[in-house]
Amino acid sequence: MSEPKPTSPTDGVRPNPNIMRKTKQTDAVRRQPRPPRSGGDRPSRQAKGGSIGDEGRLPRNRALAPYGLVPLPDHPMPAERLQTSVGETLRQEELLRSHDRRIPGTHTGWIDLRIQNLTPLFIGATDPQNPESTRSLRVNGRPAIPGSSLRGMLRDYLRMLTGGEVGPVNTPQLFFRAPIKVKGGKDRPLNRSQWVMSRLHDQYKAKHSGNVETKIGFLFRGGDGWRIKRSPSKLPLEMSFTDFQRCIAEHEFPHRTFLIPPNDNTYGPMEDPHHRHFQFRIVYALDPPPDPDGGYQEVERVFPSRERASEFQRTRQGYQNHEIVRCVIVLTGVAAGQRTHLYLFPMPDGFRGDLLSVPERLITEFESSEQVTQYQQQNFPGYLRVRDIDAELNEEESKRRLLPYGRGGGLPAQGIEPVWFRADESGEVLSFGRAGGYRIAVGDFDPIRVAVPEPLMGETTGRAIDVPRALFGDIDLCTSDDDRPLAVRGRVSVGSAVSSDENPDDRTPLRVQLLSPHRTAFGQYLVQNHPSCWEENPRLNTWSQENQDRIRLTGYKTYLHRHATKPDGSDAPPELDVPPELKDARERWSATQPPGDTERDIVPLRAGLTFHARITFRNLTDAELGALLRVLHLGNPVGAEPGSKSAAKDLGPAYAHKIGLGKPLGLGSIHITLRLRLTDPRERTRSLDAAAGFRAVGSDEVQRYLDAFDGALLAWEREEAARAKRPEPVELRHVERVDALLLSAQWRDRLPASKTRTMTLEEFAHYPVLPSIRDRFSRKGASRGR
């Protein structure tokens, strides 16, 4: 990670500088991969109309994204640095558990919030009375932002600001498609994508003793564990869909219909009403002899029985030198719409002897929620099994292991399953999958834990308590007398924000894509500090590289503000740069066509609504209260109430928060203003006046609490800089993490929507690197320091 460089207070974008590819070879062992078909290589995506090529490249291989990554610190700021005012007279545990008494020198009270959504807003909710509801959450019929969402948002901002723990977190194994070796030459140099893929192949090869040849076999569970029996053929036989159609019509198969798969990505063999009858069926193929020129001969004939195959071979010219091979039909993948062939796995004579051992770890990884996709759940149901041609499927029986998170996708509890696999010289399987380009784990280690500094994982007993845990509580905040972890609720509680607007819904529904982040995108999520990372032959840090010490997660993920709308919910003027993705979502919506499996229709709340909420707190020190106020204010000046000059009404606030669903589309930008009130329990007991013991806090006092927190954070960051032998920051904006967080929160001086769009698949294919937040804003070319 590059070191943050001290800059002048006026350098960069700082609105408020005060803060912050036909054939065969009979002998399977000699079978070779198919060479390119006549006519040259398979058409590239560019030839099919894709955008790969110089015209589709990003400048200097710089990635675009609707999010940014706030750098991780080496250590989280300890909460005790904010508790020095009571630390000499009070143990920290007493302070954290002081919900039933008042602690002298601390503050108790509440903060009234006024929240305005600057963009359309959607909070996901399921209405038991109307499960198909697409509206944002309601509380008692009124549009609302739940307190849990606000609390999570504030805790996340506080975590980024103070470098809080990122764990304990779910850290599943990461997977990527089995890498292939791409070779270039003087007349055919590798492009960036091919270069990176070649390096991935080298890394995988180095990890597995150089044996990375993919073979085929049959997986099953034996009495003493999982085993793979190798197929007599190193690679599967192939047969065109058109030849297969002719065979099932001519040779009296039980089922006579086999349609060519649709030319899209919706195909699934077990979801197709005709194909499901052929998946994993045992058939008999006439396998042609090796091509004299070394090419690959495709299978042209298959039969439902060996007798029919023998009869055909005796009575037809040209097939006497073909071998009758007992095979299992394998139909693969949603990409089958782009294929024209099915696979035939030659079966061994038996399943005893010469077995390969499969480590239980690979089985666990294979059946993990990260590996078993929705496609596999749907196309490997419990009743799917390898069977003779005349055996029918019984959907009431289960032949597969039941997985906890879905109805299908598990491995066979009984019987065998055809697989592609790789094994080392000792006969231990290294990886396996259900397609030739199956996904493999990046290694036998926990990749997330390797990439995150250990102090940030939050898994050490007795570790120092960070600031977010101290304010918002945790399940292991304290320990009992016998050292058992104790859950302690936070001293800050957040209520729901409710709006009284009678016409809150946006005028146009949206059809949004439900896509999850790809953590395997190392160009975006791992620190890339080699000077060549922007070049055509880059040295990129990857999840699978051997030198794991160089793997580091770039930072906390935060979404950037993207656009604005008018308060009445109508589109903003062009100069305010409404994201095209939001317009596309409106155009995709249809009242007559239901959404697809990865889509959801929503009706967001229109922009310009006002919500009111209350935060209550108890026994916070000056600096702790300042921390809470800072994540509410961000870099906005104190006293910027609606209508005031400092609110810059026409331009909107300098800084804003992000909350809810649809952040990549630009949804969920909100502006918070507040009023702080403190209580004095002693004064309340001395008077019968209902207003006694409560007081409104003015701007000067609020600023004093902010300064207490800012000073404590700056002092900590200076100590961290000295420990790491970096230049000490003069002000908080010199701390890259703090600066990046505030830049990402800029509303008035946000990046244009064109600079925060989601990249296309063609752009992703070149492994671009996401620049730092500072770098992206320094290249913005917009006005600075408004």
Image: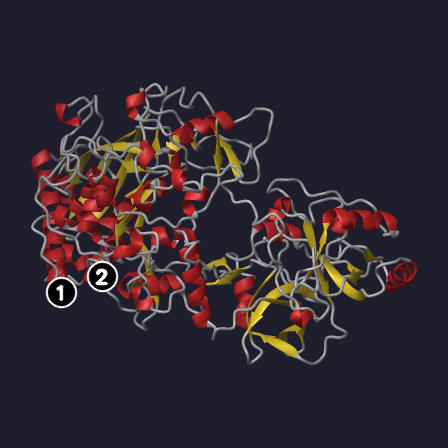
Write the residue at 91% across / 61% down: 311
Closest to the observer, 517 or 431: 431
Left or right: residue 21 compared with residue 193: right
| Residue 104 visible (yes or no) | no
Circle 2 is placed at which residue position?
74
Circle 1 is placed at which residue position?
723
The correct choice, above or below, for 269 with respect to 93 in the image is: above
First in sequence: mark 2 vs mark 1: 2
- Residue 292, position as x, y percentages in the image: 70, 64
Q: Quadrant of residue 670?
A: top left
Amino acid identity at mark 2: Asp
Write the residue at 57% across / 36% down: 596
Closest to the observer, 214 or 432: 214
Left or right: residue 666 compared with residue 530: right
| Residue 644 visible (yes or no) | yes
- Residue 781, position as x, y percentages in the image: 21, 33
* Residues at circles 2 and 1 in contact by the CB criterion of under 8 Å: yes
Q: Give the secondary structure at mark 1.
A: helix
Amino acid identity at mark 1: Arg
Mark 1 surroundings: few (<14), some (14-19) or many (≥20) residues within 10 A: few
Q: Give the secondary structure at mark 2.
A: loop
Q: Quadrant of residue 476?
A: bottom left
